[in-house]
């Protein structure tokens, strides 16, 4: 726990920078915005820089500065912590089981052109489309659906 207070200040100031009007309901004080809590804590640490624990209070101020800069950089589109997320994702994927690849072998059957697979003329396609607009797609026969599908691949 020694030295964690600078990180706590970074989180506090980062949250206050990101959501300055977020309100906490404190027991004896009532509703207080986080920006005022952060400002008071920074002020107290600033006053403590001349006392006996000046190094600790400077660490608080350094953490507060880093929290502010980090959130401002995130808002500008620069993610300083992206490499940490990438490393953690890489480590997590090391222990994730890999999917087995299924290979299936099929006999190749020579394709024979049926009447539905033969080229449909533009008039046939137009008639199929008119039928869809009148009665819906479900009204098409299997051959008409196949002709429309084959025509759409062109």
Image: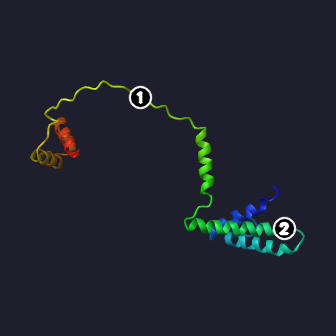
> Is 30 displayed left or right of 114 in the figure?
right
- Name of the residue lying farthest toward the right: 52
- Residue 90 x/y as whole percent: 59, 45
Closer mark to the observer between disc 1 and disc 2: 1
- Name of the residue lying farthest toward the left: 123
> Of the numbered discs in the image, which one, if any, rests on residue 55?
2
Sequence-wise first label, 1 or 2: 2
Whether residue 18 is visible, yes or no, is no
Which element carries disc 2, helix, strand or loop? helix
Question: Local crowd at mark 1 within 10 Å, few (<14), some, or many (≥20)?
Answer: few
Q: Residue at x 18, y 29 (%)?
A: 112
Whether residue 51 is visible, yes or no, is yes
Up/down of 118 relative to 5, above or below? above
- Residue 88 x/y as whole percent: 62, 48
Marks 1 and 2, how far apart at CA: 64 Å
Q: Residue at x 38, y 27 (%)?
A: 104
Which residue is labeled 1 in the image? 103
- Name of the residue lying farthest toward the top: 107
């Amino acid at each position: 726990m020694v030295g964690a207070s600078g990180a706590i200040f970074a989180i506090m100031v980062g949250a206050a920078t990101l959501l300055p009007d977020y309100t906490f309901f404190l027991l004896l004080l009532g509703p207080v915005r986080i920006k005022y809590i952060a400002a008071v804590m920074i002020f107290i640490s600033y006053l403590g820089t001349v006392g006996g624990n000046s190094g600790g209070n400077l660490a608080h101020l350094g953490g507060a500065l880093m929290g502010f800069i980090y959130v401002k950089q995130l808002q500008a589109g620069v993610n300083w912590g992206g490499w940490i997320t990438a490393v953690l994702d890489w480590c997590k994927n090391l222990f994730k089981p890999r999917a087995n690849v299924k290979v299936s072998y099929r006999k190749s059957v020579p394709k024979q052109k049926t009447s539905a697979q033969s080229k449909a003329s533009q008039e046939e396609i137009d008639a199929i489309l008119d039928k869809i607009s009148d009665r819906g797609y479900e009204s098409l026969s299997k051959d008409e659906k196949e002709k429309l599908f084959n025509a759409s691949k062109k």
